[in-house]
Amino acid sequence: MVDKLHTAIVAALNASAAQFGAATLLVSLPLLAVAYLLSLLHLPLPFIAPLVVCAHMLPLSLLAHEFAHAAVAVTLLPTAERHLVFGAGTVRRSSIYRPATDSTSAALISVAGPTAGLACAVPVMLVGSDVIGVFPWILPFLVHLASLSPSSADGAHILRYAKGLLPRA
């Protein structure tokens, strides 16, 4: 269990470190500055809280996305192949590399990342007082859905799995 967790954490950190840093610098810090300025205007906390939570959760969602891919991969792979799971990334792209699996496992691994990334929007929704006040701060989390497009690796795995479910003509 500890070995699986360690492998998944290291892979996720290696895959998402550059994006985490860039998101913190380019998104989180400016959002926190805006939240501070809004607090100087004495705006109510329910208006500012989603912004602050979004600033913290957005970079974490990138890490959660890659961690979920890695965690599901090391769980589904045979013990002898778990050490082959690793992550690599740049500011523009992050990936978890793993041995080939059957289409069902590949689809589960592919869906896990975007699901975890989107789940990071839940705390933003919980601190808001209304949908209109929270909605703009949930939008950045939708970037995780892009990895489900057919042109992405995750989307291609899911599409291959779905085609296998279709009855043969």
Image (cartoon, grey):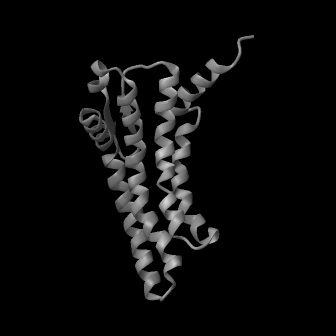
Quadrant position of the N terminus in the picture = top left
Residue 54 percent across, percent down from the top left: 46, 64
Q: Residue furthest front?
A: 1
Q: Can residue 38 be seen in this view?
A: yes
Residue at 26% from the left image edge and 26% from the top image edge: 83
The percent position of residue 12, horizontal first and vertical second, equals 33, 41
Residue 93 seen from this side? no
Q: How many marks?
A: 0
Is 167 on the left-hand or right-hand side of 138?
Answer: right
Where is residue 23 drawn, in percent x and y? 39, 56
Tell me where residue 77 appears, x and y as whole percent: 37, 23
**Relative to residue 81, is residue 158 depicted above or below?**
below
Q: Is 167 left, or right, of 51 in this rendering? A: right
Up-down: is 62 above or below 46? above
Q: Quadrant of the C terminus?
A: top right
Q: In which quarter of the image is residue 82?
A: top left
Horizontal side, residue 3 vs residue 42: left or right: left
Nearest the viewer among 164 and 93 is: 164
**Rendering quarter of residue 65:** top left
Name which residue lies at 52% across and 77% down.
46
In percent of the image, x 58 and y 23: which residue is there? 161
The extreme top residue here reads: 169
Q: Is residue 89 above or below residue 165?
A: below
Residue in view at x 48 percent, y 62 percent = 123
